[in-house]
């Protein structure tokens, strides 16, 4: 599972958690593990850093011959590519698509603009401009990479790639 949304969507479709008995259940990070736990599923593998590369590393000693990856349609392919490189047969199940809502009245000033995913960077920058002087705060490496691709170096990147980690990073930056 690569996100809380993916976990929720998959379990909405499965409807019977017993169907998941047997396989190793991996969650990309603590937020996804919490979403699974709320539905009665305990993840077997949860890396400390919520990025595909860390999940691949956490699965290093776990034999994976076949994998189902539940994710967003526009998600990076790092996890499935990494598992395929190790010889696994991988099925990708795109369970949802992140769609930007139009921003009618984007703020003209802000101290900070926070981004929680690469898709949020793309969506925001397609619909609005960063306010002059605003500092950008990224939840993690993939989000920071999206900011760089858009020509903006992130001012702050959360060490813990969760919403709480993002808030902590912003507060630490604001405190100086």
Image (spheres, rainbow, N blue to C red):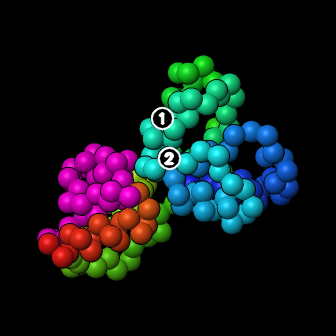
Residue 98 visible in rendering: no
Give the side of residue 95 with respect to residue 134, left or right.
right
Q: Residues within 10 Å of mark 1 (few under 14, many from 20)?
A: few
Q: Disc 1 to disc 2, how far (Cα)?
A: 8 Å
Label 1 sits on residue: 57
Q: Is residue 34 above or below residue 104?
A: above
The magenta stretch is 132-160
Magenta-colored stretch includes residue 136 = yes
Give the side of residue 90 with respect to residue 108, left or right.
right
Q: Quadrant of the C terminus?
A: bottom left
Q: Quadrant of residue 105?
A: bottom left
Q: Are marks 1 and 2 in contact (CB under 8 Å)?
A: yes
Mark 2 residue element: loop
Which sits in the foreground, 106 or 154?
154
Residue at image coords 35%, 71%: 167
Q: Quadrant of residue 15?
A: bottom right
Give the side of residue 71 with respect to residue 132, left or right.
right
Q: Residues within 10 Å of mark 2 (few under 14, many from 20)?
A: some
Residue 37 visible in rendering: yes
Location of residue 53 in the rendering, given as x and y in whole percent from the top left corner: 44, 38
Location of residue 97 in the rendering, given as x and y in whole percent from the top left corner: 57, 54
Q: Quadrant of residue 137?
A: bottom left
Mark 1 residue element: helix
Q: How many marks?
A: 2
Label 2 sits on residue: 47
Q: Is residue 94 above or below residue 137?
A: above
Location of residue 132 in the rendering, given as x and y in whole percent from the top left corner: 15, 71
């Amino acid at each position: 599972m690569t996100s809380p949304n993916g976990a929720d969507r998959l379990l909405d479709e499965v409807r019977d958690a017993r169907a998941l008995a047997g396989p190793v259940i991996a969650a990309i990070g603590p937020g996804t593990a919490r979403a699974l736990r709320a539905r009665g599923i305990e993840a077997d593998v949860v890396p400390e850093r919520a990025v595909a590369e860390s999940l691949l590393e956490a699965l290093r000693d776990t034999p994976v011959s076949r994998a189902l990856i539940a994710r967003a349609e526009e998600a990076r392919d790092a996890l499935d590519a990494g598992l395929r490189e190790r010889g696994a047969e991988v099925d990708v199940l795109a369970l949802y698509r992140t769609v930007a809502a139009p921003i009618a009245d984007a703020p003209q000033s802000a101290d900070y603009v926070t981004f929680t995913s690469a898709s949020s960077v793309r969506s925001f920058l397609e619909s609005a401009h960063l306010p002059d002087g605003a500092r950008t705060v990224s939840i993690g490496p993939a989000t920071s990479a999206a900011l760089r691709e858009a020509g903006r170096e992130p001012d702050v990147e959360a060490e813990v790639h969760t919403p709480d980690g993002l808030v902590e990073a912003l507060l630490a930056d604001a405190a100086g």
